[in-house]
Amino acid sequence: QVQLVESGGGLVQAGGSLRLSCAASGSIFSINGMGWYRQAPGKQRELVATISSGGSTNYADSVKGRFAISRDNAKNTVYLQMNSLKPEDTAVYYCYADLISTWAFFSTDYWGQGTQVTVSS
């Protein structure tokens, strides 16, 4: 069994900062890419940022220069530092991990339960 548990969401004023964390645990053999998506009310889920096992990063244009993704491979944890937050960043943020479990021969995407981020104007 594999679990992804997120933390760090909350309510913040525009211009403020939040740091999200997502820890993967359970029967994990190896983790490839990790990342964050978000979904605002009435909108489709969209990619926010990804990071490869080697540390290569990719960001949505809307968050470039404001958000930073990082990971701690020893802790199977991915982070999202969010600065200069805007009301349009309000959404449920989901982490994912493309990983190989101890009982599988190929990788599968696992998702966290989501954490609410609300930015007030």
Image (cartoon, grey):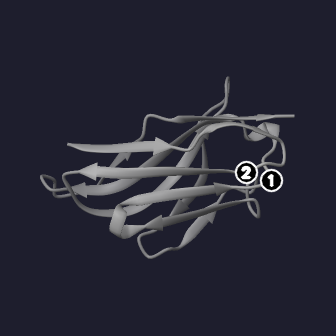
1 or 2: tag closer to the N-terminus: 2
Element class at badge 2:
loop
- Placement of 54 over or under 70, stated as above or below: below
Q: On the picture, is 70 further left or further right than 74? A: right
What amino acid is at disc 2?
Ser
Which quarter of the figure is the N terminus placed in? top left
In this view of the protein, which residue sits in the foreground, 57 or 67? 67
Q: On the picture, is 78 further left or further right than 102? A: right
What amino acid is at disc 1?
Ser
Please provide percent x and percent y for residue 80.
59, 56
Residue at horizontal 54%, vertical 59%?
50
Which quarter of the figure is the C terminus placed in? top right
Instruction: For label 2, count other residues whose C-alpha is less than 10 Å away and answer few (under 14), some (14-19) or many (20+).
Output: some
Res 102 → quadrant: bottom left
Disc 1 target residue: 84
Please provide percent x and percent y for residue 71.
47, 65
Residue at horizontal 73%, vertical 51%?
17
- Placement of 32 over or under 6, stated as above or below: below
Q: Disc 1 to disc 2, how far (Cα)?
A: 6 Å
Res 83 → quadrant: bottom right
How many marks overall? 2
Query: In this view, which residue lies farthest toward the top?
Result: 42
Residues at discs 1 and 2 in contact (Cβ within 8 Å):
yes
Please provide percent x and percent y for residue 105.
16, 58
Residue 17 shows which numbered tag? 2
Query: In this view, which residue lies farthest toward the right?
Result: 121
